Amino acid sequence: MNLIKPANEEKDHWVPDEAVSKCTSCGSDFGAFNRRHHCRNCGDIFCDKCTKGRIALTADENAQQVRVCDRCMAEVTRRLSNAKEAASKPAGLQTHEDLARKLQACGGYYLTVPRSTKVSGKGMREVACPICTVHLQVQVPASGSETIECGVCQHPFLVSAR
Protein backbone atom coordinates (compact mmCIF):
# COMPACT_ATOMS: atom_id res chain seq x y z
CA MET A 1 0.00 0.00 0.00
CA ASN A 2 1.52 3.31 -1.12
CA LEU A 3 0.92 6.03 1.48
CA ILE A 4 3.15 8.62 -0.15
CA LYS A 5 1.19 11.69 -1.21
CA PRO A 6 2.31 13.86 -4.13
CA ALA A 7 4.29 16.78 -2.70
CA ASN A 8 2.76 19.48 -4.91
CA GLU A 9 -0.86 18.28 -4.84
CA GLU A 10 -3.26 21.18 -5.47
CA LYS A 11 -6.26 21.07 -3.15
CA ASP A 12 -7.93 24.43 -3.83
CA HIS A 13 -10.57 22.84 -6.10
CA TRP A 14 -11.46 20.09 -3.57
CA VAL A 15 -14.90 20.03 -1.99
CA PRO A 16 -14.48 20.55 1.82
CA ASP A 17 -14.89 17.32 3.83
CA GLU A 18 -17.59 18.91 6.00
CA ALA A 19 -19.75 19.73 2.96
CA VAL A 20 -20.50 16.09 2.12
CA SER A 21 -21.95 13.29 4.25
CA LYS A 22 -22.55 10.78 1.43
CA CYS A 23 -20.51 9.50 -1.51
CA THR A 24 -21.10 11.73 -4.54
CA SER A 25 -21.42 8.66 -6.78
CA CYS A 26 -23.16 5.83 -4.91
CA GLY A 27 -24.71 7.77 -2.02
CA SER A 28 -23.29 5.59 0.76
CA ASP A 29 -22.96 7.31 4.16
CA PHE A 30 -19.50 8.23 5.37
CA GLY A 31 -18.45 7.07 8.83
CA ALA A 32 -15.72 5.28 10.77
CA PHE A 33 -15.55 2.40 8.27
CA ASN A 34 -16.46 4.28 5.09
CA ARG A 35 -13.97 7.10 4.65
CA ARG A 36 -14.05 10.14 2.37
CA HIS A 37 -11.66 10.27 -0.59
CA HIS A 38 -11.15 13.21 -2.94
CA CYS A 39 -10.89 12.66 -6.66
CA ARG A 40 -7.66 14.43 -7.63
CA ASN A 41 -9.15 15.47 -10.96
CA CYS A 42 -12.62 16.88 -10.15
CA GLY A 43 -12.22 17.43 -6.40
CA ASP A 44 -15.52 15.78 -5.45
CA ILE A 45 -15.71 13.37 -2.50
CA PHE A 46 -16.30 9.64 -2.93
CA CYS A 47 -16.06 6.39 -0.99
CA ASP A 48 -13.16 4.00 -1.60
CA LYS A 49 -15.31 1.77 -3.81
CA CYS A 50 -16.03 4.68 -6.21
CA THR A 51 -12.39 5.85 -6.41
CA LYS A 52 -10.61 2.62 -7.33
CA GLY A 53 -8.93 4.26 -10.35
CA ARG A 54 -5.34 5.46 -10.28
CA ILE A 55 -3.99 7.42 -13.23
CA ALA A 56 -1.51 10.18 -14.03
CA LEU A 57 -3.40 13.40 -14.80
CA THR A 58 -0.89 14.54 -17.43
CA ALA A 59 0.94 12.88 -20.29
CA ASP A 60 4.26 13.68 -18.60
CA GLU A 61 6.38 10.50 -18.27
CA ASN A 62 7.20 11.30 -14.64
CA ALA A 63 3.65 12.16 -13.58
CA GLN A 64 2.57 10.21 -10.52
CA GLN A 65 -0.63 8.18 -10.61
CA VAL A 66 -3.28 9.59 -8.29
CA ARG A 67 -6.73 8.58 -7.01
CA VAL A 68 -9.61 9.48 -9.33
CA CYS A 69 -13.33 8.72 -9.35
CA ASP A 70 -14.75 6.34 -11.92
CA ARG A 71 -16.18 9.17 -14.07
CA CYS A 72 -12.86 11.03 -14.16
CA MET A 73 -10.96 7.80 -14.86
CA ALA A 74 -12.85 7.50 -18.14
CA GLU A 75 -12.50 11.22 -18.94
CA VAL A 76 -8.76 11.42 -18.15
CA THR A 77 -8.07 8.19 -20.05
CA ARG A 78 -9.86 9.62 -23.10
CA ARG A 79 -8.07 12.98 -22.77
CA LEU A 80 -4.62 11.37 -22.49
CA SER A 81 -5.40 9.02 -25.36
CA ASN A 82 -6.45 11.97 -27.55
CA ALA A 83 -3.29 13.88 -26.58
CA LYS A 84 -1.12 10.87 -27.39
CA GLU A 85 -2.90 10.36 -30.72
CA ALA A 86 -2.56 14.04 -31.63
CA ALA A 87 1.15 14.00 -30.78
CA SER A 88 1.77 10.96 -32.98
CA LYS A 89 -0.37 12.13 -35.92
CA PRO A 90 1.35 13.68 -38.96
CA ALA A 91 0.74 17.42 -39.11
CA GLY A 92 -1.46 17.35 -42.24
CA LEU A 93 -3.88 14.68 -40.97
CA GLN A 94 -7.21 15.84 -39.57
CA THR A 95 -9.64 14.10 -37.24
CA HIS A 96 -13.39 14.00 -37.83
CA GLU A 97 -13.71 16.56 -35.02
CA ASP A 98 -11.30 18.88 -36.88
CA LEU A 99 -13.31 18.42 -40.07
CA ALA A 100 -16.60 19.06 -38.27
CA ARG A 101 -15.27 22.32 -36.76
CA LYS A 102 -14.02 23.40 -40.17
CA LEU A 103 -17.38 22.61 -41.75
CA GLN A 104 -19.33 24.40 -39.00
CA ALA A 105 -17.17 27.50 -39.44
CA CYS A 106 -18.24 27.68 -43.09
CA GLY A 107 -21.97 27.26 -42.53
CA GLY A 108 -22.23 23.61 -43.56
CA TYR A 109 -21.21 23.85 -47.22
CA TYR A 110 -17.95 24.05 -49.05
CA LEU A 111 -17.63 25.41 -52.54
CA THR A 112 -15.12 23.26 -54.34
CA VAL A 113 -14.07 23.80 -57.90
CA PRO A 114 -10.86 23.07 -59.77
CA ARG A 115 -8.39 25.92 -59.26
CA SER A 116 -8.40 26.85 -62.97
CA THR A 117 -12.22 27.10 -63.17
CA LYS A 118 -14.11 30.38 -63.03
CA VAL A 119 -17.28 30.11 -60.97
CA SER A 120 -20.30 31.51 -62.79
CA GLY A 121 -23.10 29.91 -60.80
CA LYS A 122 -24.16 27.81 -63.80
CA GLY A 123 -23.58 24.08 -63.87
CA MET A 124 -23.32 23.79 -60.09
CA ARG A 125 -24.43 20.64 -58.27
CA GLU A 126 -24.48 19.41 -54.69
CA VAL A 127 -22.48 16.23 -54.12
CA ALA A 128 -21.41 14.37 -50.99
CA CYS A 129 -17.74 13.62 -50.41
CA PRO A 130 -17.40 9.80 -50.33
CA ILE A 131 -14.93 10.04 -47.42
CA CYS A 132 -16.19 12.64 -44.95
CA THR A 133 -19.79 12.82 -46.39
CA VAL A 134 -19.81 16.61 -46.27
CA HIS A 135 -22.08 18.17 -48.92
CA LEU A 136 -20.19 20.20 -51.49
CA GLN A 137 -21.33 22.64 -54.15
CA VAL A 138 -19.23 21.79 -57.19
CA GLN A 139 -19.09 22.96 -60.77
CA VAL A 140 -20.11 20.11 -63.04
CA PRO A 141 -17.91 19.52 -66.08
CA ALA A 142 -19.57 20.10 -69.46
CA SER A 143 -18.78 16.53 -70.49
CA GLY A 144 -17.01 13.48 -69.12
CA SER A 145 -15.81 13.63 -65.54
CA GLU A 146 -13.37 15.66 -63.53
CA THR A 147 -11.41 15.02 -60.35
CA ILE A 148 -12.08 17.50 -57.58
CA GLU A 149 -10.71 17.74 -54.07
CA CYS A 150 -12.98 17.87 -51.03
CA GLY A 151 -12.63 21.25 -49.34
CA VAL A 152 -12.85 19.61 -45.92
CA CYS A 153 -10.81 16.39 -45.95
CA GLN A 154 -8.80 17.11 -49.15
CA HIS A 155 -9.72 13.70 -50.58
CA PRO A 156 -9.87 13.71 -54.41
CA PHE A 157 -12.93 12.16 -56.10
CA LEU A 158 -14.67 12.18 -59.49
CA VAL A 159 -17.60 14.37 -60.48
CA SER A 160 -19.34 13.41 -63.72
CA ALA A 161 -21.23 15.54 -66.20
CA ARG A 162 -25.01 15.49 -65.81
Image: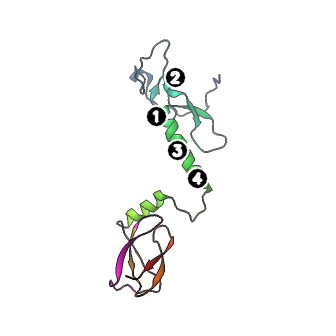
At 60% from the left and 50% from the top, the residue drawn is 84
The quarter of the displayed image where residue 159 is located: bottom left
Identified by mark 3, the residue type is Arg
At 32% from the left and 83% from the top, the residue drawn is 121
Q: Does the magenta stretch include residue 123?
A: yes
Calculate the distance from the C-alpha at mark 2 to the C-alpha at mark 3. Answer: 22 Å
Residue 88: image location, x then y, percent: 62, 55
State which mark lies toward you, 1 or 4.
4
Disc 4: which residue: 85
Q: Which element is circle 4 on?
A: helix
Sequence order check: which comes first, mark 2 or mark 4?
2
Residue 52: image location, x then y, percent: 54, 27
Sequence order check: which comes first, mark 1 or mark 4?
1
Q: Which residue lies furthest to the left in this view?
A: 122
Task: Please say whether residue 9 is visible from this viewpoint.
Answer: yes
Sequence order check: which comes first, mark 2 or mark 3?
2
At 42% from the left and 64% from the top, the residue drawn is 133
Disc 1: which residue: 13
Q: How many labels does the image show?
A: 4
